[in-house]
Image (cartoon, grey):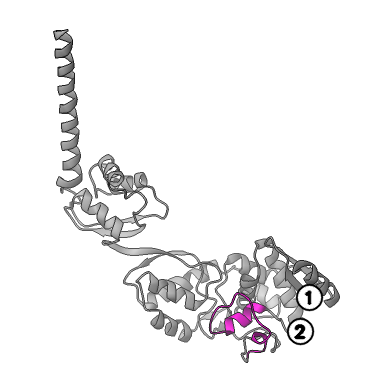
Amino acid sequence: MRALLRTLATLAAVVLLVAASVAAWFAYAAFGDRSLPAVPKQVVIVRGASVADIAEELSNNRVIANGLAFRLLARLQGSEEDLRAGAYRFAPHQSQNAILQELRTGGAQIARWVTFPEGFTDRQIAQRLQAEGIASAAVLDRRFATTRLNVGGTRTANLEGYLFPSTYLVDVAATPSQIVAMLTGQFFKELPADAVQRAAALHVTVPQAVTVASLVEREAKIDADRPMIAGVIYNRLRAHMPLQVDATIEYALPHHKAELSYADLKVDSPYNTYLHEGLPPTPIANPGLPSLEAALHPAKTDALYYVYCGGGHHVFAKTLAQHQANVARCLK
């Protein structure tokens, strides 16, 4: 019995010693070791990266010495969901805890991932950048409104429609000029190579095709409808019919409205496609690639009307009578 007790006591002592050793190792790895980074290090944390992914990236870049300690520290602090993606510049000789706190607060962040959804207006892009602490919305609004581009041989009125919607890693100190260059540069990369030829075949300029794309972007719910909606727009233009696109009215109003009133349809604006024939003066949003493709490759259709019928789908009609029947069926 005494031998058993001695054995148990020995095991307990060993367990305590191991636990103390692990605790000492963890405390040093997480709080005491400041050997890394040996020099300033710049690291990009991608969106959606897990703590394990981040620990591996930091280890590979010699920002931390031990990924296991970093993961344990994040779990103990409940930080696993709080770490921010972006580009960081870490100062030399910091503890893993200090690195973790910078990832939680964004303190060492030099660039942030910012997403601009398809259909965002220039103003919404400016507001999002301001919300991210990158730039003044008022300053960006002025820059967007006064900058013109040569697109397919035609000068644009401003940048509405030409700030390509995507996710960008934006420098926190980016100037308005750098932001414009980044977003418009992506637009020119994404613009289909045959844009000039396709626009000419449709008897429009490339900026006019981008305007059509912006209407499609704001009207369509699913990609399958985009070429059909573009086809209807071109058919109405050729027939000299007002486009009567509700999204253009919404663009003309000072504030977003979920539903338009009959009074809204009479608003005095060149963007009111109920009152004015032809395209609005500029795009009404920044379209994504599917809408640009649809505007340059519209469906061949006789339809002149469409109405949203739920489930993401529109239904199309050639005659007003057919359209009215569709409206009665879809909006009841």
Q: Is residue 268 left or right of residue 12?
A: right
Query: In the rendered view of the protein, which quadrant contains the C terminus?
Result: bottom right
As helix, strand or loop, the secondary structure at mark 1 comes to loop
Residue 304, numbered label: 1
Q: Identify which amino acid the numbered label 1 is placed on.
A: Leu
Q: Residue at x 75, y 80 (%)?
A: 236
**Location of mark 2 (residue):** 241
Residue range of the region highlighted in magenta in the rendering: 246-267
Q: Is residue 40 left or right of residue 49?
A: left
Front one among 99 and 329: 329
Q: Residue at x 42, y 52 (%)?
A: 48
Q: Is residue 194 above or below residue 200?
A: above
Q: Residue at x 78, y 71 (%)?
A: 327
Q: Is residue 302 visible?
A: no
Are discs 2 and 1 less than 8 Å apart at CB? yes
Front one among 238 and 72: 72
Q: Position of residue 308 (x, y in %)?
A: 71, 68
Q: Identify which amino acid the numbered label 2 is placed on.
A: Met
Front one among 59 and 266: 266
Mark 1 packing: few (<14 Cα in 10 Å), some, or many (20+)? many
Outermost residue to the bottom: 268
First in residue order: circle 2 vs circle 1: 2
Q: Is residue 266 magenta?
A: yes
